[in-house]
Image (cartoon, helix red, strand yellow):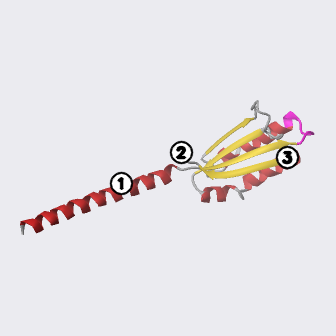
Amino acid sequence: MKNQNSIRLLLATVGFALCTIVLSVSFLIAQEKESRMLRHVVLFKFKDTSSKEDVQKVVDAFRSLKSSIPQVADFEYGTDNSPEGLANGFTHCFFITFKSEADRDVYLPHPKHKEFVEVLKPHLDKVQVIDYWASR
């Protein structure tokens, strides 16, 4: 009888430990999903005929999307300054962050995004877009 009680106690302890581990892992997975961000990277090569003022209009129009479309969680941009010479003519990089694919799905057909594309079109030579879930 004492042996059976010891076994029951051991099983209860192991069961409790397993439940604690499962809950901890579930919490960590949920926390990781909440902290993940969807990155939308856009590279532009402008036409040689576009002036600096034309390019700046495109940049300003792109920057305005952060305040116009609530689904944009963050926005960064910059111009190439790599000494490697591997940019293939792409000069501008835009980095848009979304919290979900659903947010990106609202952004892409959004009227403000479409307005931006119309400002961009006359000056765009090439574009490269990559979306990815950020991992650490």
| Whether residue 92 is situated above or below residue 14 in the rendered picture | above
Q: Is residue 52 magenta?
A: yes
Residue drawn at (73%, 47%), measured in percent from left and top?
Answer: 42
Q: Earlier in the sequence, mark 3 or mark 2?
A: 3
Most common secondary structure along the magenta stretch: loop
Position of residue 51 in the picture relative to residue 27 (left or right):
right
Q: Secondary structure at mark 1?
A: helix
Residue drawn at (6%, 65%), measured in percent from left and top?
Answer: 2
Asked whether the beta carbons under mark 3 and mark 1 sit within 8 Å of each other, the answer is no
Residue drawn at (40%, 57%), measured in percent from left and top?
Answer: 26
**Residue labelled with disc 2:** 136
Q: Secondary structure at mark 3?
A: strand
**Residue labelled with disc 1:** 24
Residue drawn at (30%, 60%), measured in percent from left and top?
Answer: 19
Q: Earlier in the sequence, mark 1 or mark 2?
A: 1
Position of residue 33 in the picture relative to residue 126 (left or right):
left
Q: Earlier in the sequence, mark 3 or mark 1?
A: 1
| Whether residue 113 is situated above or below residue 47 in the rendered picture | below
- Name the image quarter holding residue 16: bottom left
Q: Secondary structure at mark 2?
A: loop
Marker disc for residue 124: 3
Query: Mark 3 is on which residue type?
Result: Leu
Q: Name the residue nearer the viewer: 66 or 10.
A: 10
- Name the image quarter holding residue 45: top right
Q: Give the magenta part as a residue range.
A: 47-53
**Can residue 21 be seen from the camera position used here?**
yes
